[in-house]
Image (cartoon, rainbow, N blue to C red):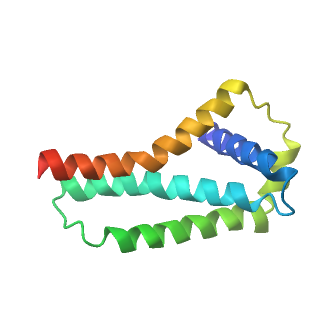
């Protein structure tokens, strides 16, 4: 669990540093990016569960909106209200070039995976 928390702390720090010099509130960009990636990853799991249990896919868009809103509120609470941002900034995490490249692939894969899964299910398994 600590590796996952450390990974998301590094992601927050990386996207925070990207916006630090160009925006007056740089903490909102990483919160939005992390929330979207987490919501999409969870919806990937939900799509698999819906498929394996043969549940109708029609409530998925509403579920995704609720999940996205919930993750956004959770991350806003965590980084703004609980002040996790200050903890992350004081940790002195080292961001390597490999991590920076991997973070882009993580976000891209997180956003694309459910779309490919839905396409695969509709074209080949239905």
Residue 11 x/y as whole percent: 68, 43
Residue 55 or 115: which is nearer the viewer? 115
Q: Quadrant of the N terminus?
A: top right
Query: From what the image shows, is residue 4 above or below residue 16?
Result: above
Q: Residue furthest front?
A: 22
Q: Quadrant of residue 31?
A: bottom right
68 lies left or right of 98? left
Residue 35 x/y as whole percent: 58, 59
Residue 79 or 122: which is nearer the viewer? 122
Residue at 47%, 67% in the rendered image: 67
Residue at 60%, 66% in the rendered image: 72
Query: From what the image shows, is residue 92 above or below residue 33?
Result: above
Number of marks drawn? 0
Query: From what the image shows, is residue 77 above or below residue 126?
Result: below
Residue 122 x/y as whole percent: 18, 53
Residue 110 x/y as whole percent: 48, 46
7 lies left or right of 42? right
70 lies left or right of 21? left
Residue 3 or 54: which is nearer the viewer? 54
């Amino acid at each position: 669990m600590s590796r996952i928390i450390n990974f998301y702390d590094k992601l927050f720090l990386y996207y925070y540093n990207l916006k630090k010099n160009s925006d007056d509130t740089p903490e909102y960009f990483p919160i939005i990016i992390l929330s979207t990636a987490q919501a999409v990853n969870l919806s990937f799991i939900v799509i698999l569960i819906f498929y394996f249990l043969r549940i109708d896919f029609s409530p998925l868009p509403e579920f995704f909106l609720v999940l996205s809103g919930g993750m956004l509120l959770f991350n806003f609470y965590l980084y703004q209200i609980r002040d996790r941002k200050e903890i992350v900034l004081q940790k002195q995490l080292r961001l390597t070039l490999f991590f920076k490249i991997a973070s882009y692939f993580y976000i891209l894969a997180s956003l694309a995976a459910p779309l490919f899964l839905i396409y695969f299910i509709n074209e080949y398994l239905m």
